[in-house]
Amino acid sequence: VAPAPYVFGWVLAGMEFLWSIQWTACSVVMANHFSDNPAIFAASITTLSLMSTGGTIIAKVGGTALLTAMGGSWSKVARVGALMALVGAAISLFLVQDSPRKQWVPTTSISSSTNKHMATN
């Protein structure tokens, strides 16, 4: 029994939401690393947007090629994509530092001002 078409829509909407949330995470990490140099920070945001667009194009072309190579099995292509996502998440978790000094310790001005506000109230 095949699921109703709207189920695929909700799944796709959920994946798009989770993908788009990564922009915020990447921006915070870059702000932590490059807040003292606005030119490098701006260049890193530009690079992020270009790589995001390039990654989308590569995923569409590569996904089509992979679908053809795997005999049209969309479930195998989905498994390859999921595996790649897990590898990317592991790399981000274990190799990317939140700030230049420490890992898993955010030092953005947002967190500092929020903490100061919460401490005074």
Image: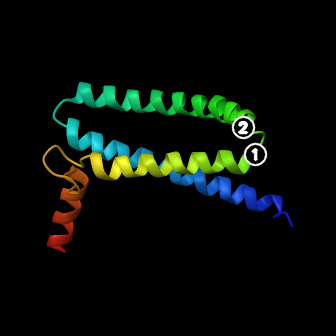
Residue 78 shown left or right of residue 113 in the figure: right
Q: In the image as oriented, which residue stretches furthest toward the right?
A: 1
Q: Position of residue 7 (x, y in %)?
A: 75, 62
Q: Nearer the viewer, residue 94 or 109?
A: 94
Q: Position of residue 26 (x, y in %)?
A: 36, 44
| Local SS, label 1 | loop
Q: Is residue 34 above or below residue 94?
A: above
> Please, what is the three-letter code of the amino acid marked with disc 1?
Ser
Residue at the (63%, 31%) spot, across then down: 62
Colour treatment of the image: rainbow
Residue 52 shown left or right of residue 14 in the figure: left
Residue at the (56%, 51%) spot, across then down: 82
Compute the Cα span from label 2 to label 1.
6 Å
Residue at the (21%, 70%) spot, across then down: 118
Q: Is residue 13 above or below residue 1?
A: above
Q: Which residue is mark 1?
A: 73
Say which label, 2 or 1, has the lower sequence index: 2
- How many marks the image carries: the answer is 2
Q: Quadrant of the C terminus?
A: bottom left
Q: Position of residue 9 (x, y in %)?
A: 73, 55
| Local SS, label 2 | helix
Evaluate if marks 2 and 1 touch, with contact meaning CB atoms under 8 Å apart.
Answer: yes
Numbered tag placed on residue 67 in the rendering:
2
> Please, what is the three-letter code of the amino acid marked with disc 2?
Leu
Q: Nearer the viewer, residue 53 or 59?
A: 59
Q: Position of residue 79 (x, y in %)?
A: 62, 51
Label 1 environment density (alpha carbons within 10 Å; few <14, some 14–19, many ≥20): few
